[in-house]
Amino acid sequence: MTNRPRSRFNTVIDPEAVEEVKKLVLVKRKVVITCHVSPDGDALGSSTALCGVLKSLGKDVKIVTADCAPKSLLFLPGVRDIVSHTREPERARKLIEECDLIFCLDFNDMKRVDRLGEFIEGSQAARVVIDHHLGDALPCDVLISRPEVSSTSALLYIFLYQAGWASRLTRATAADLYTGMMTDTGNFSYNSNDPDLYVIIADLLRKGIDKDNLYKLVHNNASESALRLNGYAQYRANYLLGGRLALITLSGQELKEFDYNKGDTEGLVNMPLTIPEVQWSIFMREDPGEVVKVSMRSKGDFPVNLVCQELLGGGGHINAAGGEFRGSLPQALDFILESVSRYEHLLTPRQGGSSH
Ligand code: 5GP
Ligand code: MN
């Protein structure tokens, strides 16, 4: 029996790209790692894991994000050291300006890092992208983009393995990667049939992670008001296109009434998909500043990334995507309601064939 994952990981990423990244890490000293706004488990897990590994290599490394981590992910030890632009704008700008290597993890569009985008674009630092989103890549020196891998965290593990650095993962950084793999696959309920995912998990378990506890830490931290808000939103959901499209909205006023905290509606958009007939689910949340955050989920071949890109200039994955609408919730709702019929032909016809 060997403790090492199968050697097929050696060719998942072009070995030349892996060598180029290793060379950059060797010659550069000040490193910044960044990921997308409203960072999720995958964005933060991959960032904190890479940060730990680079520190073990003697690098001066900081994670810089556009905004803060959600409460549910504050248990990840590395998250406490993150510099967020919302809290420390000057420090965030300076770190990016003064570093000589930037890792962009889990995004492929500069709009996804808000204000950090202009700093990253203006920086002279070498840029490495490790990502799994569909669509055009970010301009960079080395690109590691594999949309068929279900999380950036799993892809980062494979990179570390190929680089000969997987042995540098500790119990803490293994937990970071597991958290990203778990959250980006809905706790291994979608995009999770690749046997190699479980080869990776076996290695992370050998590092001492407690996967059962990680599930609890991420998911079992709701509040009474959050549960009431989610129940209310589900009660008021609309079902359109013959019950195949679910539409949930929450206005700024409703959020206030339920004492909304960031992260409270995480997972809400997935709930309608538990109805067998629902193939497409949309959740619209009115955020401060006349912005409506739109999240979409789907089953099967229905491409919500394409819908989000066409309607909102957003993106994501075929079954999970998002974007933003600039304007009020009623305006966003009108716009979405006018647009959904354009995509009806991409849905599977209803059982029985009737469109009523
Ligand atoms: P969520 O709905 O959970 O915010 O995001 C679902 C997926 O869509 C994630 O993979 C996320 O990276 C992507 N996504 C969400 N919002 C945007 C957006 O505004 N632009 C792009 N390009 N992707 C987004
Ligand atoms: Mn991801």
Image (cartoon, helix red, strand yellow):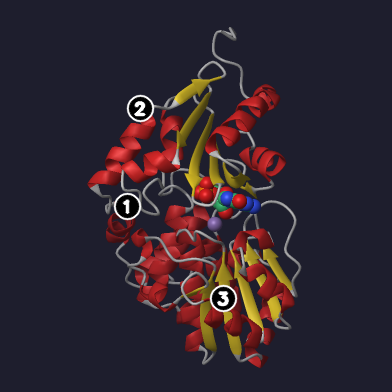
Real-space Cα separation, disc 2 to disc 3, in angstroms = 41 Å
Relative to 182, say whether 310 is above or below: above
| Residue at 47% from the left image edge and 49% from the top image edge | 185
Q: Residue 33: which disc?
A: 3
Dot 1 corresponds to which residue? 219
Relative to 15, say whether 355 is above or below: above
Q: Which sits earlier in the primary sequence, circle 1 or circle 2?
A: 1
From where the camera sits, is residue 42 visible? yes
The kind of residue tagged 3 is: Ile
Are circles 1 and 2 on residues that touch, CB within 8 Å? no
**Quadrant the N terminus occupies:** bottom left
Dot 2 corresponds to which residue? 235
Residue found at the very far left of the displayed protein: 224
| Residue at 44% from the left image edge and 71% from the top image edge | 2
Relative to 282, say whether 9 is above or below: below
Q: Closer to the camera, 212 or 315? A: 315
Q: Percent from the top left, x then y, of residue 22?
A: 65, 83
- Depth-wise, is mark 2 or mark 3 nearer the camera? 2
Mark 2 is surrounded, within 10 Å at the Cα level, by few (under 14), some (14 to 19) or many (20 or more) other residues, namely: few
